Image (tube, helix red, strand yellow):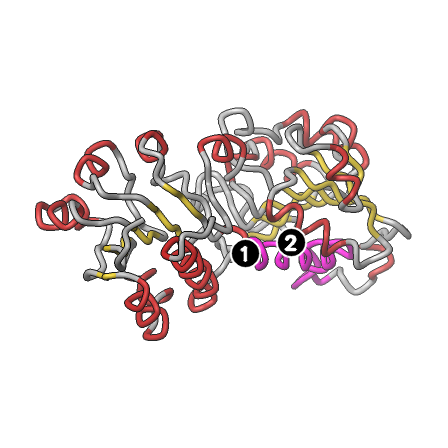
Amino acid sequence: MSSERPEALLVMDRKTLLAQFGEREMARLRELAALGDPVSSAELSSAGVRRRLAEVEVLITSWGCPPLDAEVMAAAPELRAVLHAAGSVRGHVGEEVFDRQVLVTTAADVNAEPVARYTLAAVLWSGKKVPFLFGRSDSWDGDRQVRMRDEQTVVVVGFSRVGRRVVELLREFDSYRVLVVDPVAEPAEITAAGAVPATLEQALPQADVLSLHAPLLPRTRGLIGESELEELPPGAVLINTARGGLVDTAALERACRTRELYAVLDVTDPEPLPADSALHGLSNVVLTPHVAGSLGEETRRMSAAALEELERYVAGRPPRAPVTRRSLEVQA
């Protein structure tokens, strides 16, 4: 860290910049750093911006930041920190950044809250199949349409930031038993959070609700496929607010067409779904356009998190939410 205000650069798409950084945020940035004009994704490869990169110590990034590849890193010899004002850094931070021992932080903890709240709402409403009864002429007889049990089992796949918060929110209700599936998490941690550790094979047949919160990694792509969907009991609800690629879309289409299976999908694979996808128009499927996470000015909470990381960096204090090479292997 330099003894003076560090040279800093904002790198993100213009829409994100306008949403996340208003007058107050920009004023605070200028107090903490020598801030140049923001750079859009397309501009990062221009000769003029590359010359500016030579002096930059801190990059503040968000949605729309292109990959910080070897060419970018070579143009930024003074770079010491990448402070991300959004969730996953997987799209733009790679080996080149970690090889240089550049500090990387994320605002994913902040983004976890709205996603967890969306999930909680989906769990609560889906228990009585409310989203799936909208507009149905035969939905008046609730006793016939909905089979309620005194205690429902919610299976949380992925003890991630969002997964942990979902478990915490569900603890407020005495009508849910929560199982957590995560081969990386310590069973004692899961138990301490008030949930029961389980394998996917153990959990699926018990699930009234299956909620996905795992990162999309090579080993988790297609985690929920045809055989897993077949293990779910009749009337089960699949909620996906994580990554569409966790689910085999073709298998889900078949299952939702032919079985008593329900789905609430905020993410899909591909995203958006093609117009001819069988998931469109099914009364047992609710599709939302990736709205669970922070939106619009709501994202300024993530800007505030990045600003706090900048304050800590300037003061020589440890970061609140660092991202390491190891953590990126198991997190989104």
x%, y% of residue 11? Answer: 27, 53
Q: Residues within 10 Å of mark 1 (few under 14, many from 20)?
A: many
Q: Is-magenta flag for residue 169? A: no
Tag 2 near tag 1, CB within 8 Å: yes
Q: Nearer the viewer, residue 226 or 38?
A: 38
Image position of 280 with respect to 245: above or below: below
x%, y% of residue 106? Answer: 45, 49
Image position of 75 with respect to 31: above or below: above
In this rendering, would 300 be left or right of 212? left
x%, y% of residue 136? Answer: 69, 60
Q: Amino acid at mark 1?
A: Ala
Q: Farthest residue in the right direction?
A: 150
In this rendering, would 33 be left or right of 220? left
Image position of 128 with respect to 202: above or below: below
Which quadrant holds residue 200? top right
**Residue for badge 2:** 119
Q: Farthest residue in the front direction?
A: 3
Which quadrant holds residue 211? top right
**Residue for badge 1:** 292
> Which residues are the magenta region?
112-137
x%, y% of residue 164? Answer: 67, 47
For image coordinates 52% across by 29% down, the residue present is: 221
Q: Amino acid at mark 2?
A: Thr
Looking at marks 2 and 1 on the same chain, the residue that comes earlier in the sequence is marked by 2
State the predominant SS element of the stretch in magenta. helix
Helix, strand or loop for disc 2: helix
Q: Farthest residue in the left direction?
A: 47
Q: Nearer the viewer, residue 152 or 166?
A: 166
